[in-house]
Image: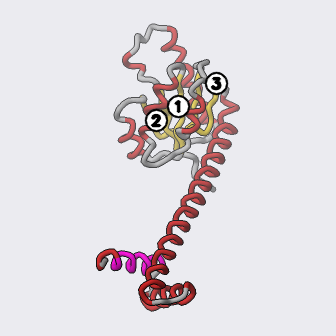
Amino acid sequence: MSQPLRIVVIIPDLAVMDDQEDHVRQQLERSRALRMGLLEAQYDVVATLPADVFLHERIAQLRPDLIIVDAESEARDALEHVVLATRDERRPIVLFTNDPDTTHVPDAVAAGVCAYIVEGLAPPRIRPILQVAMARFQHEQALRAELKDARDELKDRKTIDRAKGILMQRQALSEKQAYDRLRKLAMDKGVKMVQIAQRMIDAAELLG
């Protein structure tokens, strides 16, 4: 049986507000409903944190699987803290908000928000929302990995081509002969061909 998702919930810092104000009570009720919905869906809420300057350290220590931002208003401010806290290690982010201003949704999605839910905190909706968010995040991570592999492959190919050019010019070899030479050297040394190619380039630059 798989372990439940470890979730950190980000909420406004209510300690700095007047606890008699209506919007504070509403936020407390929202946060309570969210936690109850997560518990009912058998998720593991490891912490409830304010969106402040210490968030980066706390996220790094807790290493959650998913981050939920519960923002009654001022969603942009909360997101800025979360994005800064996750820039070194991306994590799926889900935003629940009552903020009707959605002009910054494109920026939020670009920053890593996998689900942006306005007035949709009903407990029965929580599990499908988080499942979709996790699936989207995993898909995007796979695409990022594929893109990185493609870029690395292109970079390696350019390095090998450059080393082949050095051999062709300095030893009067054909392209195939230069390639075979690099491949044999790599096999003899037990390393990748791109490593041999880079060493050859470095030596050529050193010797001029």
Q: Answer left or right for 181 relative to 39.
A: left
* Amino acid type indicated by mark 1: Val
Q: Earlier in the sequence, mark 3 or mark 2?
A: 2
Viewer-proximal residue, 129 or 187?
Answer: 187
Verify CB contact (< 8 Å) between mark 2 and mark 1.
yes
Part of the protein shown in magenta: 194-204
| Other-residue count near label 2 (Cα within 10 Å), few / some / many at <14 / 14–19 / ≥20 | many
Give residue 124's quadrant in the image: top right
**Tag count in the figure?**
3
Residue at screen point 67% across, 37% down: 129
Give above or below for 178 relative to 84: below
Mark 3: amino acid: Val
Measured along the vertical axis of the image, is residue 18 above or below residue 203? above
Residue type for callout 2: Val
Q: Is residue 25 magenta?
A: no
Q: Real-space Cα distance between discs 2 and 1?
A: 8 Å
* Mark 1 lies on residue: 69
Sequence-first disc among 2 and 1: 1
Can you give x and y, in whole percent of width and height, for residue 121 in the image? 64, 26
Residue 20 in the image: state x and y as whole percent.
45, 8
154 or 4: which is nearer to us?
A: 154
Residue drawn 44% across the image and 78% down it: 197
Q: CA distance from mark 3 to mark 2?
A: 18 Å
Q: Earlier in the sequence, mark 1 or mark 3?
A: 1
Q: Which quadrant of the rendered structure holds the C terminus?
A: bottom left
Counting from the top left corner in percent of width and height, residue 39 is at: 59, 36
